[in-house]
Image: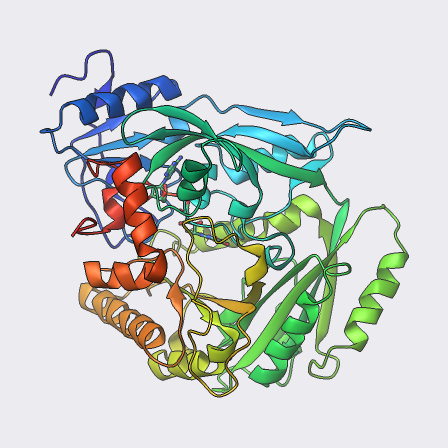
């Protein structure tokens, strides 16, 4: 096919793979746009030639798990080839509104952080890992330990430039072309390609007091997490993880000492599972004695294992960039570029105990490689106008159900061992699929985050009562079903 002035390359290796290393779909070509106009030209051309049936996927940093940024026999747009524009606007004294950054959709969050810190500002809401693109995380949600306070990244966007599946370039916001704005946020790349986003900024802290507390009781662990998120005036970040084996702590952060040697209750080879809450308090002054009081006040209310509390103070950049340190370590051990059969679930508070039991029935703590993250979010921080999906209110049918305001994110972030052949990978995927199905369909009432479903029925169930709206948006903004085929949202109009 002749694309006129557009330079479509046949070198497709990068575009045929992703972080998951499970799906390898080759496109027929790759576009490296010089400007949003190139993207608009491509999509206008394809939507005008209705018989071409070529699909198109934007590829940000390619950190999907199941081929979501791939396009089998289609065209992949490498968003990192757009000029890396980052324009910071600092709100002046007396000026209404917020400080913000206008960034192109292919920019990485770490690049935005570096640039905004130069003027003492930073985005409010993060992902744990910063080498992800702005457009890629806004197509999903973008969550980390700040989400309980500020909502996901999609709750911290003021405006977007989007090129729809018809090739139209639209600037949209909550007050301008608002349907497209909300459709695209959490929209799994289905409605348009984000070429620019206006991200809310705030004053960046000087440093971060970063604490870890250990638990042997799951109920006390979650109770303390919920206590922490009820104190947004004091606490700036809350996460947590399961300590399944000695590997759960080794390398889990270089900022902390190697706990297995220093904590007698967590002996090597023990089959007992522990839990760790990680939380942080921002420090705004170089010497901030007030922080000591705040931390003490928080700790007084918590019920962690006696004396199992650890604290460090690090720069804001190092705190936010902590997973990069782990990446370097895993790369050094040659275990970064391995298959990652990850599973991420949103679990209502009322189903979190059942989910833990289900999880433990399907993983073997002794040989589990990678973190299992568990931390609470607040539903009120998520706009119901966006495409992002949380468990439906009242979804969990367990005893004690009814408190749906708190929703847990559970990330089973497994790396496969180096001696895991394809059959072993398939077995891990089968187990995760089973956990997901049981948690969605049973008493737990969960939903997948970064969803991966294989049938039209599952997608309908995923969106629940929002399905009709999602399908209507698709028909309106990408009527020929060109965009993001790797999400596998099948038979959308059936
Ligand atoms: P890609 O994989 O490149 O794309 C993902 C989807 O978005 C595809 O469908 C693609 O077509 C579409 N897309 C990409 N760019 C655009 C665009 N500009 N416009 C429209 N659609 C677009 N997520 C969290 O929420 N919190 C975390 O803490 C977190 N940590 C992670 C850590 C690691 C190591 C990894 C691998 C992933 C993590 N994720 C996390 C998941 C991550 O947010 C998603 O996988 C996200 O999609 C990755 O961004 P990306 O730029 O790599 O997207």
Q: Residue at x 50, y 79 (%)?
A: 350
Residue 417: quarter of image:
bottom left
Vertical relation: 30 (above or below) 152: above
Q: Residue at x 38, y 21 (%)?
A: 36
Q: Residue at x 58, y 68 (%)?
A: 240
Marks counted in the figure total: 0
Describe residue 244's horizontal placement relative to residue 462 as left or right.
right
Describe residue 164's horizontal placement relative to residue 159 as left or right.
left
Which quadrant, please, contains the N terminus? Answer: top left
Viewer-closest of 246 and 152: 152
Residue 426: x %, y % from top left: 21, 67
Q: Residue furthest top?
A: 5
Q: Can residue 374 be seen by looking at this rendering?
A: no
Vertical relation: 162 (above or below) 378: above
- The image's colour scheme reads rainbow
Residue 474: x %, y % from top left: 28, 42
Q: Can residue 317 be seen by looking at this rendering?
A: yes
Viewer-closest of 127 and 460: 460
Residue 279: x %, y % from top left: 67, 63
Residue 462: x %, y % from top left: 32, 62
Viewer-closest of 284 and 350: 350
Describe residue 426's horizontal placement relative to residue 350 as left or right.
left
Vertical relation: 210 (above or below) 470: below
Residue 16: quarter of image:
top left
Q: Residue at x 26, y 36 (%)?
A: 478
Viewer-closest of 147 and 362: 147
Q: Residue furthest left?
A: 51
Describe residue 409's horizontal placement relative to residue 210 as left or right.
left
Vertical relation: 6 (above or below) 66: above
């Amino acid at each position: 096919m002749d694309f006129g002035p557009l330079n479509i390359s046949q070198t497709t290796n990068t575009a045929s793979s992703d972080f998951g290393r499970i799906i390898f779909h080759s496109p027929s070509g790759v576009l490296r746009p010089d400007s949003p106009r190139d993207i608009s030209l491509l999509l206008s051309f394809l939507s005008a030639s209705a018989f071409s049936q070529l699909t198109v996927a934007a590829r940000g940093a390619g950190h999907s798990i199941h081929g979501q940024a791939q396009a089998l026999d289609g065209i992949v747009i490498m968003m990192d080839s757009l000029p890396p524009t980052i324009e910071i606007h600092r709100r002046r004294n007396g000026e209404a509104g917020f400080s913000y950054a206008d960034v192109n959709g292919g920019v990485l969050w770490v690049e935005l952080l570096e640039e905004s810190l130069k003027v003492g500002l930073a985005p409010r809401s993060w992902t744990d890992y910063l080498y992800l693109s702005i457009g890629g995380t806004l197509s999903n949600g973008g969550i980390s330990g700040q989400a309980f306070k500020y909502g996901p990244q999609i709750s911290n966007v003021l405006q977007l430039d989007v090129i729809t599946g018809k090739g139209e370039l639209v600037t949209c916001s909550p007050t301008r072309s608002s349907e497209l704005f909300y459709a695209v946020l959490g929209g799994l790349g289905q409605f348009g390609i984000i070429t620019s986003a206006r991200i809310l900024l705030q004053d960046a802290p000087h440093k971060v007091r970063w604490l870890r507390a250990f638990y042997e009781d799951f109920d006390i662990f979650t109770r303390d997490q919920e206590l922490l998120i009820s104190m947004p005036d004091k606490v700036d970040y809350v996460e947590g993880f399961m300590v399944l084996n000695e590997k759960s702590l080794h390398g889990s952060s270089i900022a902390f000492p190697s706990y297995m040697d220093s904590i007698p209750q967590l002996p090597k080879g023990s089959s007992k599972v522990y839990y760790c809450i990680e939380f942080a308090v921002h420090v705004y002054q170089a010497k901030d004695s007030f922080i000591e009081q705040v931390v003490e006040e928080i700790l007084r209310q918590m019920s962690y294992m006696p004396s199992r509390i650890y604290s460090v103070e690090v720069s804001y950049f190092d705190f936010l960039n902590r997973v990069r340190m782990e990446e370097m370590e895993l790369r050094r051990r040659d275990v970064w570029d391995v298959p990652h059969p990850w599973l991420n679930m949103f679990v209502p508070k009322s189903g979190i105990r059942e989910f833990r039991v289900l999880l433990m029935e399907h993983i073997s703590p002794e040989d589990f490689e990678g973190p299992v993250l568990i931390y609470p979010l607040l539903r009120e921080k998520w706009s119901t106008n966006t495409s992002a999906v949380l468990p439906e209110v009242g979804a969990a049918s367990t005893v004690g159900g009814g408190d749906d305001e708190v929703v847990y994110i559970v990330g089973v972030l497994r790396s496969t061992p180096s001696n895991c052949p394809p059959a072993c990978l398939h077995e891990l995927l089968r187990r995760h699929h089973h956990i997901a199905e049981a948690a969605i369909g049973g008493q737990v009432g969960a939903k997948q985050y970064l969803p991966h479903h294989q049938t039209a029925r599952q997608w309908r169930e995923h969106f629940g009562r929002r399905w009709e709206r999602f399908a209507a948006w698709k028909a309106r903004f990408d009527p020929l079903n060109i965009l993001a085929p790797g999400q596998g949202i099948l038979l959308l109009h059936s």
